[in-house]
Amino acid sequence: MQLYITTGSPYARIVRVVVLEKGLTDRVEILQAKTRQTGSPYYDINPSGRVPYLIRDDGVGLEDSALICAYLDQLDNNPVFAFPADQVWEARRLEALVRSMLDGLAVLVREKRRPLNEQSPTIVLHETDRAKRMLDLWETEIGQPIFNGPLNMVQIVMVCTLGFAGLLSDFDWRAGHPKLAKWFDELSKRPSFASTAP
Ligand SMILES: N[C@@H](CCC(=O)N[C@@H](CS)C(=O)NCC(=O)O)C(=O)O
């Protein structure tokens, strides 16, 4: 299989972590895509131009980190990241909320990478405020069992989200969130996170 990524993409990192955790490095070739460039040859591979994008062994392409992770997880008929029935809705609820923070941060990082005179202060303020509200929420929720049991998708998405937030030099997500920072630092030591850190 071939997995198209960019090294800076937190969504691609989520899949790269799953590839490592599932021991699939021999089966998945990781390729760099040229995204956000007019006329990129990558658009012939994935017309949406987004990463991550997995081309399966049968040649069919899958987009979206959640879908790709679920696909890779079940390949060996031993899906370790699928939640048992009694946890599934709580896990999906939490993963959706973490992804909501990640989607906002992606907008914020993109905005801040534009030249200063092209940045929208309204968007920067809106997304910064959203990130702060979500971080406050996670500071109170990070003790929940789903964040502290065996590695799962909620934890993977959270680590990749906070790692991505760390790229914002003028936004210290750790300030006022000591429990979240401690949780992040502990889990970040895991080899799959350490070797994919932005
Ligand atoms: N919901 C998607 C989001 C993927 C996404 O937004 N990827 C960004 C990189 S972080 C991208 O490919 N951007 C290139 C573009 O918008 O053209 C997922 O979970 O995979």
Image (tube, rainbow, N blue to C red):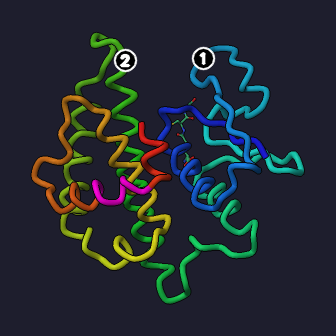
Q: Residue at x 56, y 32 (%)?
A: 6
Badge 2 is on which residue? 114
The answer to whether residue 152 is above or below residue 104 is: below
The answer to whether residue 36 is above or below residue 132 is: above
Magenta stretch in the rendered image:
184-190
Please tell me which residue lies in front, 78 or 121. Answer: 78
In the drawing, does residue 80 fall left or right of residue 122?
right
Q: Amino acid at mark 1?
A: Gln
Q: Amino acid at mark 2?
A: Arg
Rounded to the nearest whole Å, what is the CA distance between mark 1 and mark 2? 14 Å
Q: Residue at x 19, y 68 (%)?
A: 140
Residue 112, horizontal then vertical, whole percent: 32, 24
Please tell me which residue lies in front, 21 or 162. Answer: 21
**Mark 2, secondary structure of its residue:** loop
Quadrant where ligand 1 appears: top right
Residue 141, horizontal then vertical, whole percent: 25, 70
Q: Tell me the quarter of the picture where residue 40 sits.
A: top right
Residue 37 — which label? 1
Please tell me which residue lies in front, 28 or 45. Answer: 28
